[in-house]
Image (cartoon, rainbow, N blue to C red):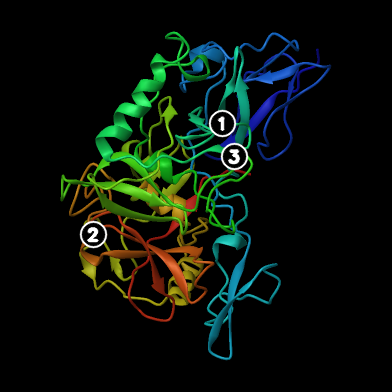
Amino acid sequence: MRCIDLWLAVSGALVLFGCAVGQVDGPGGRAPTCTDGSVLDGDSCIAAGDADGGDETLGDGDPAETGLPFVHTVPDTGQTQCAEKIDDTWSIDAACAAAYAVGSAARAFGQDAHYAATPVAALFDGPRAGGDWPADFISRDLLTGLEWTSCPLGLGGSDCSSGTAAARVFSDALSDCAALDTLNAGAGFAGRTGWRLPRIEELQRLTDYGAAGATIEATAFPGTPAAVFSSASTYVSVPTQHWVVDFASGRIQNGGKAGAFLVRCVRGSFTPLATTAALEGGYVVDHALGLRWQRCPAGLSGPACNIGEASSLTWPQALAYCEGLSTGTISWRLPNVHELVQITDYAAADPAIDTALFPRLAPYLYQWTSTNALATPAQSWAVNTANGELWQLDKDVAGAYAVCVSSLRFQ
């Protein structure tokens, strides 16, 4: 079988991934495909009929299982639409075809859609049946190796159309995910064990901010209700609450642990950017994820970000600030929603961010993202760095701040 080496650009350099038999890959890190009649089973292309869904082929993020490392990068948001202001009213430009310019208050350049597949396109595989357990469907994040139940608990089938989605209080959500390990005579759901309720950083990665209806990748996760899903992350400031994702909008918020929310389970390991970044040359840099951050919000400077005064900006002003920032050869932009969420530390509170890396973000609460709120075009997404909440803010109100990011980069 023929094998074409799989390359991904990481930290400005090309890194060779060991290539499995029959595996090929296109430019830009597209999902792998197989040749000569072989089939994709996890990261490997094997002879048709050999895919058994066993733990040796689909993973827990452990490169030792497959010989292929996972790229723990931040996925693109999926947003391809822009927003423009016509006669004082914001509307969605579905094709992003208008004439956008840096500094324009009506057609601001630097929006999420202007940076397609940045840092890298989201890559999912599934749903597919778990080998000897054809009623168990799983989907996989090919960037991290995390495996997910294709359907929320209570739903089943390849299109998740059978059954009724089951809402669970926090304690039951934890135990119900763990109980998947006991299915199939102890082999576990789809022949895998290690199932758990996802952390908020993991659950939020599934959001697709370009989607209509439920804001989730619809092919890998069909039939997902536009509803609120639980995470395993406790809201540290109020331990009786936990973090949830509203897939009707893409919002991250807190919900009471006694409240009942929908559940999707995951297995595997994933290290968020917030735990892997370090200071380098005056910036916050994560070579593994391919991102470089300004430490200070707009208006502040110095090693401790205590020189100057932080600038409260409108959304077009925030886009223009980052696009116009000049630091040698580095090209800066306003981060998209997935990127900004990934530097949030949901294990901390007030601030929900590493102050050794970002010493002066939290006092200024909301930080703008470049991602439009498609359902409410006059708003854009912003992250509250004091508590980690993700919310929509009015674009024309100078109610948030700007911290800029640069790709190292993925191309």
What residue sits right under mark 1 in the picture?
Answer: 139
Does 63 sit above or below residue 312?
above
Q: Amino acid at mark 2?
A: Ala
Q: Amino acid at mark 3?
A: Ser
Q: Residues within 10 Å of mark 2 (few under 14, many from 20)?
A: many
Calculate the distance from the C-alpha at mark 2 to the C-alpha at mark 1.
Answer: 36 Å
Give the quadrant of the N terminus: top right
In the image, taking residue 392 as reference, residue 222 lies left or right, namely right
Q: Amino acid at mark 1?
A: Ser
Q: Nearer the viewer, residue 202 or 345?
A: 202
What residue sits right under mark 3 in the picture?
Answer: 161
Name the N-terminal-most of marks 3 and 2.
3
Q: Residues within 10 Å of mark 3 (few under 14, many from 20)?
A: some
Image quadrant assignment for residue 162:
top right
The spot of residue 34 in percent (x, y) is 76, 22
Residue pictured at 30% horizontal, 27% vertical: 175
Q: Give the label on residue 362, or none.
A: 2
Q: Nearer the viewer, residue 270 or 170?
A: 170
Is label 1 in a helix, a strand or a loop? strand
Residue pictured at 46% horizontal, 46% vertical: 291
